[in-house]
Amino acid sequence: MISATGFVLAGGFSRRFGTNKALFLLRQRPLIQYSLDTLSACFSHVSVISKDVEPYSQFGVPVLRDESDLQTPLAGILTGLRNTHTEWNFFLACDMPMMSQKIIRRLYRRAKQPGQKQKVEVVLPVAGGKWQPLAAFYRKNLLETLPGAIEKQISVRDWIKLHFYGAVRFEQTAEFTNINTREELDALETD
């Protein structure tokens, strides 16, 4: 097991999807179950973070309520970092069912890489040239900068740029597929 904590972010409003996509079925399983299974195979401690706790109590892991009502992934990261006992914490969106343990382990190796002049605070994948901040490791010490960033409504990407981060490049992009619409879910269902 990786010496870190895993969090599934399920606090979005699923506007483009039309209903709570985390609970929508993909191959007879709730979409969120894929993220939970992947994280449970990597981490001893896994929690769900959401604005609404009740729908996720059925999954057998702790569910934490977002500490901010603002609609931003930074609210979920804030909640996770306030409720962790580990230095490193992996946050994964609930709508990324293809994420693999192999990718998570590669990111963790980068986070723990010795001999750096400055301590890396965020380790995120860049897949096909695109940042993937909702499948990334965040160091607990970032907690102090989050409330101000949320209040100023800074984007996750811009907030990360304010810190020392390490990017891990991936040529393949399938593992980073995220589901925003029913059409995207249907396409994955038929693959």
Image: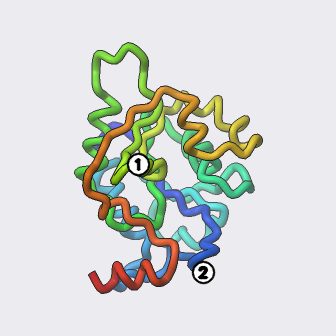
Q: CA distance from mark 1 to mark 2?
A: 28 Å
Q: Amino acid at mark 2?
A: Thr
Quarter location, residue 116: top left
Q: Earlier in the sequence, mark 1 or mark 2?
A: 2
Vertical relation: 127 (above or below) 83: below
**Residue at image x 37%, y 45%?**
125
Quarter location, residue 173: bottom left
Residue 114 located left or right of residue 10? left
On residue 45, which mark appears? 1
Q: Please, which residue is most extreme toward the front here?
A: 129
**Which corner quadrant holds the N terminus?**
top left
- Count how many numbered circles sit on residues in the image: 2
| Number of other residues with Cα within 10 Å of mark 1, as a class: few under 14, some 14 to 19, many 20 or more | some
- Tags 1 and 2 in contact by the CB under 8 Å rule? no
Q: Which sits in the foreground, 83 or 88?
A: 88
Q: Position of residue 187 (x, y in %)?
A: 36, 82
| Number of other residues with Cα within 10 Å of mark 2, as a class: few under 14, some 14 to 19, many 20 or more | few
Residue 114 located left or right of residue 11? left
Q: Position of residue 63 (x, y in %)?
A: 55, 59
**Residue at image x 26%, y 42%?**
106
Q: Which residue is mark 2?
A: 19
On residue 135, which mark appears? none
Q: Position of residue 100 (x, y in %)?
A: 28, 57
**Residue at image x 43%, y 74%?**
31
Secondary element at image label 2: loop
